[in-house]
Image (spheres, coloured by chain):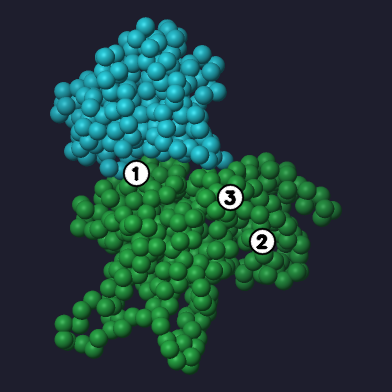
Amino acid sequence: MDEFDAISLSGKVVIVLGHFGCGKTNVSVALAKALSHYNTTYLVDYDNVNPYFRAADAKEYLSRYNVRVVAPEFANTNVDIPAVSPYLNTVLLDAANGASAVIDVGGDMLGAVSLGYIHDKLKALDPVVLFVFSAYRPLTETCEQTLAVMSEIEQACGFKITALVNNSNVGSLTEKEDIESSASLAKELCRTTGLPLLFTSYMTKETPAAEGKTFRIENTTRKLF
Amino acid sequence: MSKVLIKGNEAVAEAAIRSGCRYYFGYPITPQTEIAEYMAKKMPTVGGLCLQAESEVAAINMVYGAAASGVRVMTSSSSPGISLKSEGVSYIVGCDLPCVILNVQRGGPGLGGIQPSQSDYYQATKALGHGDMQLFVLAPSSVQEMAQLTADAFGIADKYRMPVLILADGALGQMMEPVDFDALKFTPEPKKPWATNGHGGKRKKNIITSLFLKPEELEANVLERAEKYKIVTENEIRYENYMCDDADIVIVSFGITARISKAAVNEARARGIKAGLLRPITLSPFPAPVLRKLADTASAFLSVELNMGQMVNDVKLAVECRKPVSFFGRTGGSLPSSDDVLEQIIKISGGLK
């Protein structure tokens, strides 16, 4: 058991997909921060579904690590309409020249479908396609339910998932044991899909025991009060 | 599904399904669309129906029809959409039908904004529709309570044959908290002999209508309903009393602002100021008798809301001018911090000395 080193993703485009509320944004922010140690890094807020909590919220936090956050022009305003940043092409051009880019996509197939807009350009960059899951989210608690969501997302965005991320948590009340007991779902998903588990992410004080790598992430979700 | 991390909106949807609600009619609007999302995914798996209506007006009238046929049914929307539903709500009241309506409030007036607000307090408690009418209004303060009050709402609606409105806000709808669904308590659905679900030639036909052409008949109908409201007020007031019994300053606050106010009460207590929080869980019926009694012991009241001061007037009516009642709030989508509320408490307590 050891800590995941983001160097394996350096210089790549990483697409982060998953069910609503599984923690895609916290995982994306942590990956962007880790990648920033190696190379020019972008975090693209590509959530066109739910404007309440989004990667753009972590802009200030990530600026400390020189991560370039590219978000819809009107993110976090009252005209937060579904839109794509005009600077997206800059990211894709830079990524073609070796920069790292994490693309935080909106939840479920509804969020994934908008990837179609840049599908061909992304495909040419041979992206790593991550599927984040949490065993404590309704509608993805069992292997069967999770597989259904994965298949819907793959169909909607036209990309095959290349690796899994276990981000099972119950928010601030998460105990190390909660993460450890999600290992059975992770194992079953890996076995059924034949996909590797990239890491098990955690925010708990103690590192949970997990098969494969663990990855410490932070909660950068916007505090409402 | 004992321990899950869930959004307030999803928690309402799951609790409704577990309460036996098999019909959901709605129209999308931020920040409550996750309810329809969840219903669309889950209802077909339990033999239920989730239907996206062509408008809010259509959705509430579908609720009207479903409720008349005697099934547990709900709709949800956010502020502007709730305004559109108001005519239908009045018809449902006029027919004494049970249903559950959820308002995940956003900023107004008009299109307003998508961030949290409590500026529909007047609309919910005074006039969500024309006529001599009241709704039963519940105000949850956590995601767990979003789920429990949804379960309670179906029971109350059936018991009194009246619509129950759950008044939440964008923060409660969108934020994720752990919820224990196994801890929820449900009220079994009673028999509904009044429902228009086909008499099969075996009983007299049931008629459900809000139209009374003779004034005396309408008056009798309204008087009967007023009696019901009296019984509801006598039996169903709910509140949380947090350190009010020895409090000099009683904060009155509901929903998400009650949580901020509770933190401020704790900070005030740590500074030696005797503060307390009275959190109405039912906004209608309003816990006026409780506040009236607290006016015997407290020196001042402070209403904290996400609006320009609406519930504060109910607090004033309850306190009957015996103690000063002040107001503090933010609006437009901004939330006060506990420090902001504490500052108000300190200001009032300074004025007491």
The residue that label 2 is drawn on is: B312
The residue that label 3 is drawn on is: B257
In the visual, does A53 lie left or right of B13? right
The residue that label 1 is drawn on is: B3
- Please report the residue visible at 21 percent of the width from the left and 87 percent of the height from the top: B203
The correct choice, above or below, for B114 with respect to B132 in the image is above
The correct choice, above or below, for B218 with respect to A100 in the image is below
Q: Chain of mark 3?
A: B
Q: Nearer the viewer, mark 1 or mark 2?
A: 2
- Please report the residue visible at 76 percent of the width from the left and 69 percent of the height from the top: B322
| Mark 1 and mark 2 residues within 8 Å of each other at the beta carbon | no
| Residue B286 on image: x %, y % | 57, 68
Specify the farthest residue to the right: B353
| Residue B7 on image: x %, y % | 40, 44
| The image quarter in which residue A154 lies | top left
Q: Find numbered disc 3 in the image and state the secondary structure of the residue it sits on.
A: helix
Q: Amino acid at mark 1?
A: Lys
**Chain coloured cyan:** A
Q: CA distance from mark 3 to mark 1?
A: 26 Å
Q: Is residue A37 visible?
A: yes
Dot 3 or dot 2, earlier in sequence? 3
Q: Is residue A177 visible?
A: no
